[in-house]
Image (spheres, grey):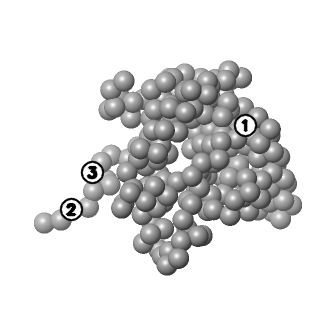
Amino acid sequence: MDLQKAILERRSHRRFTDKQVFPIEMKDILEAGILAPSPKNRQPWSFHSCGPIQKRLVADILKDKIDEMQAASTDVGSLPISLRAIEECSDLVLVYNQYSRREQGYNENRWKADTLSIGACIQNMLLVAHSKNIQSLWICDILFAEEELGDLMETDDELVAGVAFGIGMQQNLPRRPRMELHKKMSKTD
């Protein structure tokens, strides 16, 4: 698949069918992630791939978090939509920064570089999934439950995002609006 075409056609899917993604396809997706660039080749990402039982436990944690937030009159935002995607998807991958809480002398500049690298890692995974006709959703609502998810995954690494993979209920979703390039460019003379 042409890269430019993949970038133009890839969409975030929030509803999934019950069809499963083959393990070999998930391996290819994760391997694309680890090929992402990172300053000084730090490769700060680590993954926790959630099988059916862990995925259900993640969903239970998020349900509890929604209840807790609603009881405190806190806006839950799009968390229920993300929860439904997690429940429906074939595979859920939690993406962590393995250095931010462990590395001596870790500072804001390293954190920025590592976070950008992890973003590139996730983008690689999304594009390879798209090339295999596997749909995905990059989820940050799970950050509300970082501590609880860390306990479940037995890690104290920094949770950066979750990515749901599966076969989307809808194909050819419309393109979401983007601001025109000239509105994002500052002019220098």
Q: Position of residue 123 (x, y in %)?
A: 45, 43
- Describe residue 153's horizontal placement relative to residue 168 as left or right: right
The location of residue 61, given as percent across then percent down, is 80, 51
Q: Residue at x 69, y 37 (%)?
A: 85
What's the amino acid at mark 1? Gly
Residue 182 circle label: 3
* Mark 1 or mark 3, whichever is nearer to me: 1
* Kind of element beneath mark 3: helix
Q: x%, y% of residue 185?
A: 27, 56
Q: Quadrant of residue 39?
A: bottom left
Closest to the camera, between mark 1 and mark 2, is: 1
Snapshot quadrant of residue 93: top right
Q: Dot 3: within a 10 Å radius of its alpha carbon, few (fewer than 14), some, or many (20 or more) residues? A: few
Which mark, by number, is residue 187?
2
Kind of residue indicated by mark 2: Lys
Relative to 168, is 110 above or below?
A: below
| Residue 166 can be seen in this image | yes
Q: Nearer the viewer, residue 142 or 26?
A: 26
